[in-house]
Image: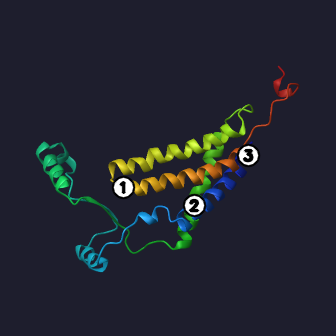
Amino acid sequence: MWLRILIGGIVGGIVVFFVGFVTHGMLNLQSRTFANIPDSQTFIEHLRGRGLKAGFYIFPDMPKGADQNDPAKMAEATDRFKTGPAGLLLIAGTGIPSMGEMLAKEFASNVLAALLAAGVVSLAGPDIGFGRRWGAVMVMGIFAWLSISASYGIWYWFPHAFTHDEFLCTFLEWSIAGLAIAAIVRRPPIVANSPVNKG
């Protein structure tokens, strides 16, 4: 069974990687929701002048530490958010990895995720058919989206179009990878006269 898990995880990871290429690279899901900042060079120069380091920033300012327990300061922050504009700013810095490095890391993460999915599917008994094993992988993909991506939309204001595309990508990737994992990771039927069933 361990060999089936290994093969299922590797094959499933390869499938997720290439389906991800189709959804992101060819269908442009998620990237189609990005908008350019008008006169971006002026905006970049402004950021450079502020000396912001690579990191994740929120605006307007939110109270931190003990100030979070101060009702007056929290009310003031809430008013600033209502007035707007408000948002998040990600500064990546200048040390962005090469495309090759990012693709390698993405592939590795896909294989690791598929190995986990194959491990879960391997727990199913021999009476669990292909359809239910496939469904289990799809549910794991949807679970991941609900646990992470949906929360980003709720708490960090990620646009609806972005989180919607993320769901489509997740569903397509793990639905198709689930076919391979469910086909490979299966327990052989129990034979009535097998020594395993004696005693």
**Residue 48 pos. (x, y %):** 27, 76
| Residue 158's disc number | 1
Q: Residue at the far top: name it.
A: 199
Per the image, label 3 sits on a secondary structure element best described as helix
Q: Residue drawn at (21%, 48%), measured in percent from left and top?
A: 65
**Residue 197 pos. (x, y %):** 82, 24
Per the image, label 1 sits on a secondary structure element best described as loop
Marker count (numbered): 3
Q: Name the residue beneath numbered marker 2.
A: 20
- Which scheme is used to colour this image of the protein? rainbow
Amino acid type, callout 2: Gly
| Residue 161 seen in the figure | yes
- Marks 2 and 3, the one that precedes in the sequence: 2
Measure how far apart labels 2 and 1 are at the Cα level. 20 Å
Q: Residue drawn at (21%, 53%), measured in percent from left and top?
A: 62
Measure how far apart labels 1 and 3 are at the Cα level. 36 Å
Q: Is residue 192 left or right of residue 136?
A: right
Q: Name the residue beneath numbered marker 3.
A: 183
